[in-house]
Amino acid sequence: MRIALRALRINKLRSALTMLGIIIGVAAVITMIAVGSGAQERIESQIKGLGTNLIILMPGSTTTGGVRMGAGSRNTLTEEDGYAIQRDIPAVQASAPTLRGTGQVVGGSGNWSTVFQGVTPEFFEARNWVVAQGRGLEPQDIAGSAKVALLGDTVARNLFGDSDPIGQTVRIRKVPFIVIGTLERKGQSLMGQDQDDIILMPISTARNRVLGQASGRLRTVGSVSIKVRDGEDMKAAEEQIRELLRQRHRLQPGQEDDFSLRNLSEVLAAREESSRIMGLLLAAVASVSLLVGGIGIMNIMLVSVTERTREIGLRMAVGARGRDILTQFLVEATTLALIGGLLGIALGVGGTVAIGQFAGWPIQLSMEPVLLAVGFAAAIGIFFGFYPARKASRLLPIEALRYE
Amino acid sequence: MTAPLIITRELRKSYALGGLEVQALRGVSLEIGGGEFVAVMGPSGSGKSTFMNLLGCLDTPSGGEYLLAGERVSGLGSDALAAIRNRRIGFVFQNFNLLARTSALENIALPLLYCGVPAAERERRAAARLAEVGLAERGHHHPAQLSGGQQQRVAIARALINDPVLILADEPTGALDTLTSCEVMALLQQLNRRGMTVVLVTHERDIAEFAQRVVTFRDGRVVEDHRVAAPRDAAAMAAQLRAEAGVQP
Ligand SMILES: Nc1ncnc2c1ncn2[C@@H]1O[C@H](COP(=O)(O)OP(=O)(O)OP(=O)(O)O)[C@@H](O)[C@H]1O
Ligand SMILES: [Mg+2]
């Protein structure tokens, strides 16, 4: 081992250049796995956050084939559509019509521009929101258009800092609300939006008091979040919802849907797939780099064996057996690869942290890829060092000694 | 006289050189007793080095027989030969053959690396040998920082580390001046007096006169083998040379 280290030290620059391939390869492996599993992790947590069986129902176009629908035709989505889905389709666990708006909210020690959503109690279930403190919305809040609100984590922290917001008053678009609860953190969405920058309030309150819509017959909504029961077939549920809505909207056969259904978990699954492919590509690049690094080691070891023929001869003359020489060169190659591997780990971890810091990508460093990289580096050293080492061990002592 | 340490019978060695067969040794039969100091002489190309390499188990003969301390060496495998070189034989080369960028102590300890001696013990024994050749304070110098004579003394210390029965020296003074040569020869004589068998190749009659017996080679054969009536004392010679040159020992 010490012989090996010394031999490498004598040719510092050459050893360093040889290691470069391994360094880059190992660093690439580590960075790739960290970034890849970070992305994977984020997507998985988003899927968990959304639920795996969420369908988003949105209003579609109000014209069909260039012909504007006649007055009175239900060309937009209504609150009642949402309730009907809940009531009439057994496969649906929760159907939550939602009204969305943006506005300035003032309260506590500051003011903040945020998104508010008018929702029903089902919304929590449909979108997997968990009340962190206080209470959620109750049916009577909806019935009475109560001026109560739940704050997302970001909003709560921006308005109230560390103090308890429950029971405090906030003004949303100048309308005073009592904070009845806070929501558990969800983190960033797939698009990088902060999902916790949100306020939830009863849908009736949003409509009547904040958005100021006349309470006419058409209580339109921006979207309906629908959660399908576990174990139910998503496609079948989607079809039932489509049937029900076409019926409710009195659409003739052949007429286009005036709404759209989106299965978000499918979108996420597609993203997961693409990030996996991305990871595979990076892995391919990394393995090519490792391979090139290994060939570099083999090359340098061959040169080293030739250069040190006399040394080998002398060692044999004083009693080194073939296998002693074999071991010496194998250890040397492996040491080279391992040092390269360790430097690669340092570079990889550094690079990963830098990517996390500056690019803001989610990263996830774990022990396994590091161990994997070390093992891989050692294996490369042994594999590519074997041929030159065996060559050295098979030299005849007298010929090696006489070598010029 | 003790039982012969070395017995060769009709020892032959030929090299294939571009289809041409070069006969370097054409049947050498020789006995060397334990404790002898033998000088091998002869013109260039007469097969001296070839003979030494066979004695040292660095090379294998093309024919004939070689017995070292009663054991037939000719038929042994490479690992067994390595073990013999390690335990029983010490080599001294014309060009020293020390490992560059490696301290004198580590050079001396090299043979011990291949017979499983622990590091601390290696260092202790190497230091003792270095003191014996009079270079105790040069242990951490690299070969490039030592003079030729000092390097050769380090090489001799290395040859001695495993208490071999046989010291083989192929022109050990070839690269040294007269005084340094005498000092190296004094060292070899001293070892010989302690019972070690020494076989030495040299071109210089002066050097051969330090030995007890001179064997002369010509064209791969032994042509002359005589005892030296009164071998010269190298230590005294060196002292005299030093005195003439006014150098302190
Ligand atoms: N490896 C080899 N391949 C071919 N021929 C060789 C080889 N080694 C030695 N010879 C030949 O064998 C003969 C004896 O060589 P050797 O080296 O034993 O001579 P030597 O007596 O030591 O000479 P010198 O005094 O010059 O050292 C020479 O003719 C030489 O050319
Ligand atoms: Mg010679």
Image (cartoon, grey):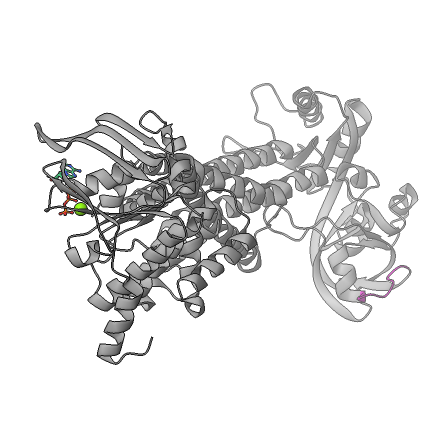
On the picture, is B92 further left or further right than B161? left
Seen in the picture, residue A399 relative to B163 is either above or below; the reply is: above
Q: Residue at x 61, y 21 (%)?
A: A252
On the picture, is A350 further left or further right than A85? left
Seen in the picture, residue B247 relative to B186 is either above or below; the reply is: below
x%, y% of residue A333?
41, 44
x%, y% of residue B231?
25, 56
Q: Is residue B212 magenta?
A: no
Total labels drawn: 0
User: Of residues B231 and B167, which is closer to you in this image?
Assistant: B231
x%, y% of residue B77?
36, 27
x%, y% of residue A344?
48, 51
Is residue A7 in view from this perspective? no
Is residue A266 in view from this perspective? yes
Q: Residue at x 48, y 49 (%)?
A: A1
User: Of residues A224 and A145, which is closer to you in this image?
Assistant: A224
User: Of residues A150 and A207, which is closer to you in this image?
Assistant: A150
- Segment tinted magenta in the rendering: A160-166
On the picture, is A31 further left or further right than A304? right
User: Of residues B233 and B108, which is closer to you in this image?
Assistant: B233
Seen in the picture, residue B202 relative to A254 is either above or below; the reply is: below
Q: Residue at x 20, y 43 (%)?
A: B49
User: On the rendering, which quadrant does ligand 1 occupy?
Assistant: top left
Q: Residue at x 25, y 73 (%)?
A: B240
- Residue B154 found in image quarter: bottom left
- Residue B218 found in image quarter: top left
Residue most toward the bottom?
A: B246
